[in-house]
Amino acid sequence: MKILLTNDDGVRAEGIRVLFKELSRFHDVLVMAPDREQSATSHSLTLTRPLRIHEHGPSFYSCDGTPTDSILLAVLKLMNHVRPDMVVSGINHGANMGEDIMYSGTVAAAIEGSLLGIPSLAVSMVDSAGADFVGAARFIRRFIKAVPSLALPATTILNINFPGKVTDGFTSFQFTSLGTRTYDDIIIKKTDPRGLDYFWIAGSPVWKKRPGSDIMAIRAGAVSITPVHMHFTDGPALDRLAAHPPRLPR
C-alpha cells in the first residue's frame, strides 16, 4: 500500500517518525510534513509567499508551509498527481477531540486528503507526555488493513485518539461521536517588563459527559475512532427554511 504521512507538529516530531518507521516495514510510505510546528493552523493554505520543499532522506520530505500545503505538494508535485492509497496524519502530540478538530492542522490534513479522493486518517495521542507512540503506531498499522472493508464515503475521514498507554496487541477501541467542551480562563493576560499587556489563548477544557463521545471512550481507556466529514450544510434547517421562507418587509 502506498501511504502519504504528514502531521502538524513538524517533520522532526517523535510521533511521525515512530509511525513512519512502523508503517515502512509493510508499506511504501512517503513523508511530507511541515518543517516546523504548525499546530492549530486548521485548514489554512500559504498563498502570500512561495513554498520550498526539503529532502531529509529517501521518501522523507518537509515543506515550509502548513499541513494542508504538505498534502497538496506531496500529491500534486512529488507524486505527480498519482494518488496514494491512504493519507495518515499524525501521530499528533496531544488530543484532537470535540470542537477542537476545527482548529487542528492534523485533522485538516486528513480532510484535505479526503477532498482529493484519498481514504484518510487523523491520529492523535491524548496524553503525549511519556506516551507510547510505538504501541499506537502498531495499532494503526493493524487498523489500516481494515479501512477498505469499512466502505466509508469518499469525503469521510476517521479521527482517531489514543489514551496515553497503548501496549502491543492493544485492541480496545470504540466508534464514537465528537464530544462537547468549554474552556475555563481561555484568555490569559500578562504584563511585560515595560508595563505593556500581552495575552495568551490557553485555558483548560471542561468536557460534557455524553455517552458515546470521544472523550468518554478515552476516559474508559479505549481508542476513540470518530467518522468526520466536510458536509457543513444543516439539512433540517435548509428544509425548514425552503418550506417556509420569510417575507421580507418592504
Image (cartoon, helix red, strand yellow):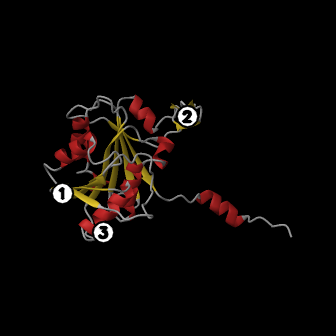
Q: In whole angstroms, how far apart are the C-alphas of marks 3 and 2? A: 39 Å
Residue 143: x percent and y percent? Answer: 26, 46
Dot 2 surroundings within 10 Å: few (below 14), some, or many (20 or more)?
few
Helix, strand or loop at disc 3?
A: helix
Helix, strand or loop at disc 1?
A: loop
Residue 191: x percent and y percent? Answer: 57, 31
Q: In whole angstroms, how far apart are the C-alphas of marks 1 and 3? A: 15 Å
Left or right: 50, with 136 as reference point: right
Q: Quadrant of the C terminus?
A: bottom right
Dot 1 surroundings within 10 Å: few (below 14), some, or many (20 or more)?
few
Foreground residue among 84 and 44: 44
Label 1 sits on residue: 59
> Residue type at mark 2?
Tyr
The earlier-in-sequence mark between 3 and 2 is 3
> Residue type at mark 1?
Ser
The image quadrant that residue 114 belongs to is bottom left
Helix, strand or loop at disc 2?
A: strand
What's the residue at 46%, 38% (across, down)?
213
Label 2 sits on residue: 183
Q: Quadrant of the N terminus?
A: bottom left
- Residue 178 visible in image: no
Residue 77: x percent and y percent? Answer: 28, 68
Task: Relative to 167, say whether 235 is above or below.
Answer: below
Contact between labelled residues 3 and 1, with CB atoms less than 8 Å apart: no
Left or right: 18, with 114 as reference point: left
Foreground residue among 20 and 39: 39
As drawn, the label of residue 76 is: 3
> Residue type at mark 3?
Leu
Foreground residue among 26 and 61: 61
The earlier-in-sequence mark between 1 and 3 is 1
The image quadrant that residue 172 belongs to is top left
